């Protein structure tokens, strides 16, 4: 069964339309990243999936059930953006409470504490936790009871690079066991290799929804080529390749995906004067900017 | 059961935040002082010493029990909304009613424990001073049960405020105002009206009902049925006879049901 079906969903606050006709499907085991600027409607969309905010029109189905229904809630894991647990409870107490609410064995909560790396801090008050540790408690509770759908709102904010890496390992395990994952994030670079699909929201509209390679192809963003050479030859190389000379000894040029090999041939033909070549495909950040800006201009 | 999970967590929080300790210390301190001080003048008058103690504790409880109730409850919804745990809790298979009544259950237990300790000390002290014979524990039991009803009323009010304002800081200010109005200003207002009326029709017809409509005054009347109290002397006795124990009980039992229903309705409208 499709884990999440969002169809033509609209959310209006008075005259202000924060989500405008969004449709999105997530199958079991898929990891979808939801990107968008602040106020693009990511959090509103997630809240509607949870049944916390009513829809103005359209429909949402969570595992075939209505959002917010008991069936939907018992198979959904949710990590809210910047959640703060009660400081005077310990991590274990807080997590066990959530385990009880979800009718999950307390042992599972203890195992999850270990899984997110909080085994040693589990019996300390949450007040003493760092932001990253609190985020891990949040992640642990979202994993309780093997949810069929995990909604993670800005899950990696406040995590250091190593913790982020571990976080995505957990997400990968989760999706391999069949959980559909929808996560929103601002940290774009880490999503490139860690998600199956990318959905971009801009001003409440879904402007892109595909895997990274497809997004790259259809955006036709140029590949940046940086050629390192020497100070004496940089001018000649720039002239021959048609690029611009930067900082004295390198030349920068751009090309499309289909011209890449030909361009490389041209560069290597110059022989000894070339010291190094760097190719940078359009990053997710470039793509993100391309899609959210381009579509905004269309409107 | 989700209600018990919520209650369990709230009890833990109340214990950690020293709410339990604070309530117990407040209640014990005042009841012990009043028992010792109240016992002195009775001597050989032949009045049951526990009745005397219960009467003085009643005048105190009218202020203290609502205060404890409001202090326990003002943060219940607003605090969770602010921390973001409300949205999280509501993403779990648990209903708003379960969350609210789980919290109520926990706070009710804290209140009951504090009052029981205070009155237990009173009973122990009195027995120690006067011996077991001739003691009637009925006034203490009545005081205990009516205190619970009074406390629950104000717990419900606290939740209602907490749901409506959604900011713990504001909620704490509002509940203090509510406390002032219910236990101090309301009576002062009535007293002023009585004086102005000078024993006219207001004193005989409207006043007794206005008095019993306030849960704090219904509580006072129920626990001091035949004592001529300094405060509102004429009014109290008149009110006692007009509304009767049935009216007072209805008020005291109706209020907690009403405020808790109000709290539930307010909580249902809170967007997490």
Image (spheres, coloured by chain):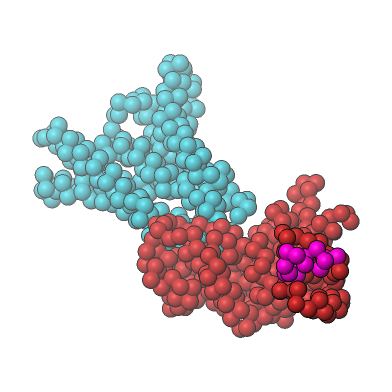
Q: Measured from the top left, where is residue A48 in percent x and y? A: 70, 61
Q: Which residue occupies the extreme bottom position in the image?
A: A177
Q: Measured from the top left, where is residue A141 in percent x and y? A: 52, 69
Q: Which residue occupies the extreme right position in the image?
A: A298
The quadrant of the picture occupied by the C terminus of chain A is: bottom right
* Segment colored magenta: A226-239
Give residue B249's quadrant in the image: top left
Q: Confirm whether the magenta stretch covers residue A235.
A: yes
In percent of the image, x 29 and y 29: which residue is there?
Answer: B228
Q: Could you say which chain is coloured cyan in the image?
A: B
* Residue B162 visible in the snapshot: yes
Q: Could you say which chain is coloured red in the image?
A: A
* B97 lies above or below B129: below
The quadrant of the picture occupied by the N terminus of chain A is: bottom right
A83 or A99, which is in the foreground? Answer: A83
A133 or B144, which is in the foreground? Answer: A133
Q: Measured from the top left, where is residue A285 in percent x and y? A: 72, 63
A8 or A137, which is in the foreground? Answer: A137
Give residue A286's quadrant in the image: bottom right
Q: Confirm whether the magenta stretch covers residue A96.
A: no
Question: Would you say B256 lies left or right of A194 here?
Answer: left
Q: How many marks?
A: 0
């Amino acid at each position: 069964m499709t884990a999440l079906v969002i169809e033509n969903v609209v959310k209006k606050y008075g005259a202000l339309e924060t989500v405008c006709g969004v449709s999105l499907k997530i199958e079991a085991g898929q990891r979808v990243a939801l990107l968008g600027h602040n106020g693009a409607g990511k959090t509103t969309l997630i809240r509607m999936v949870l049944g916390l905010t009513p829809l103005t029109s359209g429909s949402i189905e969570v595992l075939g059930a209505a959002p917010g229904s008991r069936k939907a809630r018992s198979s959904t894991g949710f990590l809210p953006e910047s959640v703060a647990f009660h400081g005077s409870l310990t991590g274990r107490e807080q997590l066990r409470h959530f385990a009880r609410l979800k009718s999950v064995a307390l042992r599972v909560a203890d195992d999850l504490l270990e899984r997110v790396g909080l085994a040693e801090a589990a019996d300390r008050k949450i007040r003493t936790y760092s932001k990253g540790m609190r985020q891990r408690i949040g992640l642990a509770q979202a994993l309780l009871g093997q949810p069929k759908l995990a909604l993670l709102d800005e899950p990696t904010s406040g995590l250091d690079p190593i913790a982020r890496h571990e976080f995505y390992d957990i997400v990968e395990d989760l999706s391999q066991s069949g959980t559909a994952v929808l996560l929103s994030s601002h940290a774009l670079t880490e999503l490139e290799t860690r998600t199956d699909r990318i959905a971009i929201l801009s001003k409440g509209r879904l402007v892109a929804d595909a895997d990274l390679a497809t997004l790259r192809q259809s955006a036709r963003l140029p590949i940046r080529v940086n050629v390192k050479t020497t100070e004496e030859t940089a001018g000649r190389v720039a002239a021959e390749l048609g690029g611009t000379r930067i900082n004295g000894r390198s030349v920068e040029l751009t090309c499309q995906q289909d011209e890449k090999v030909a361009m490389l041939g041209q560069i290597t033909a110059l022989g000894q004067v070339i010291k190094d070549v760097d190719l940078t495909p359009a990053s997710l950040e470039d793509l993100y900017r391309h899609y959210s800006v381009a579509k905004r201009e269309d409107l | 059961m989700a209600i018990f999970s919520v209650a369990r967590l709230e009890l833990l929080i109340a214990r950690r935040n020293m709410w339990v300790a604070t309530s117990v210390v407040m209640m014990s301190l005042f009841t012990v002082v009043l028992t010792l001080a109240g016992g002195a003048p009775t001597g050989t008058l032949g009045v049951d010493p526990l009745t005397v103690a219960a009467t003085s504790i009643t005048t105190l409880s009218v202020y203290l029990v609502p205060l404890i109730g409001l202090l326990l409850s003002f943060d219940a919804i607003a605090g969770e909304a602010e921390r973001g745990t409300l949205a999280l809790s509501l993403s779990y298979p648990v209903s708003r009613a379960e969350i609210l009544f789980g919290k109520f259950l926990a706070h009710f237990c804290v209140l009951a424990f504090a009052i029981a300790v205070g009155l237990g000390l009173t009973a122990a002290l009195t027995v120690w001073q006067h011996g077991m014979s001739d003691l009637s524990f009925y006034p203490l039991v009545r005081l205990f049960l009516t205190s619970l009803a009074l406390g629950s009323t104000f717990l419900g009010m606290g939740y209602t405020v907490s749901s409506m304002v959604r900011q713990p800081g504001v909620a704490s200010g509002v509940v203090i105002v509510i406390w002032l109005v219910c236990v101090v200003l309301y009576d002062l207002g009535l007293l002023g009206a009585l004086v102005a009326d000078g024993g006219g029709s207001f004193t005989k017809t409207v006043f007794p009902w206005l008095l019993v409509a306030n849960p704090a005054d219904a509580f006072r009347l129920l626990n001091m049925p035949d004592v001529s109290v300094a405060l509102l002397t004429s009014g109290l006795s008149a009110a006692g006879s007009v509304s009767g124990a049935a009216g007072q009980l209805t008020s005291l039992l109706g209020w907690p049901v009403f405020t808790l229903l109000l709290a539930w309705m307010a909580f249902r409208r809170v967007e997490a």
